[in-house]
Amino acid sequence: MARVCIDVQHIGKPNKPRDRGAAWPADGSGLVEVHLTLGYAVAMERALHDLGHEVFLLVDGYYGDRHKRVNALAPDLYLACHVNAGMGGKPYNRGEFYHWPQSSNGHAAAQAIAEAVAAVAPWRCEVKPADSSRTQATMDGVRAPTVLLEPGFLDGLDASWLQQSHTLGGAMASGVDAYLRRVS
């Protein structure tokens, strides 16, 4: 049995209680990042638990000392849950799965998750090294292999697919389980 930490980002912070992440349309009357990530994170937690893994779900939005908190849990894998935005309703969509550039296990985990999601998603999935301060800040300081999950664009044409939390969370759990079985 492996230990997995699933961290739902943008769930609100003490200093920004209304932080809900990206929204489409921008006024928040439609799809909101935190609702999508919470849905797939809970589905992933249940599926991983059913597969025999010990799962820690962080949903408190507290960012201070996050990496210390995660490291204290000593997970075998840390997952930061997001959805992307920025397409403005364009027809191009993709999932993006980021890993720490120096972590071969993080890359392997991202690859396994991306492959599992690509098998059910209506778009391609890419594995990328954390290449910006935003993606690196999510991972910096965590000792476990880390994947920042961006399974799709909430403002893309097929964004409604992201609302299928059971399908998305189940696919991600399948990829996580495949990775964990390879490294154990």
Image (spheres, helix red, strand yellow):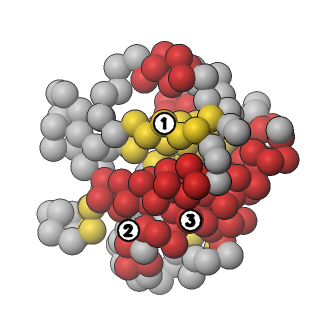
137 on left or right of 180 = left
Q: Which residue is mark 3?
A: 170
Q: Looking at the image, is mark 3 or mark 2 nearer the viewer?
A: 3
User: Mark 2 belongs to which amino acid?
Assistant: Leu
> Do we see residue 43 in this rendering?
yes
Marks 3 and 2, how far apart at CA: 19 Å
**In the image, is residue 72 above or below residue 82?**
above
Question: How dense is the environment of label 3, judged by Cα within 10 Å: few (below 14), some, or many (20 and up)?
Answer: many
Sort mark 2 into few (<14), some (14-19) or many (20+) by Cα contacts within 10 Å. many
Residue nearer the viewer, 168 or 13? 168
Say what secondary structure mark 1 lies in: strand
Q: Helix, strand, or loop for circle 3?
A: helix
Assess whether mark 2 and mark 3 are in contact (beta carbons under 8 angstroms): no
**Label 2: which residue?**
154
- Residue 56: image tag: 1
Against 6, residue 67 (above or below) is: above
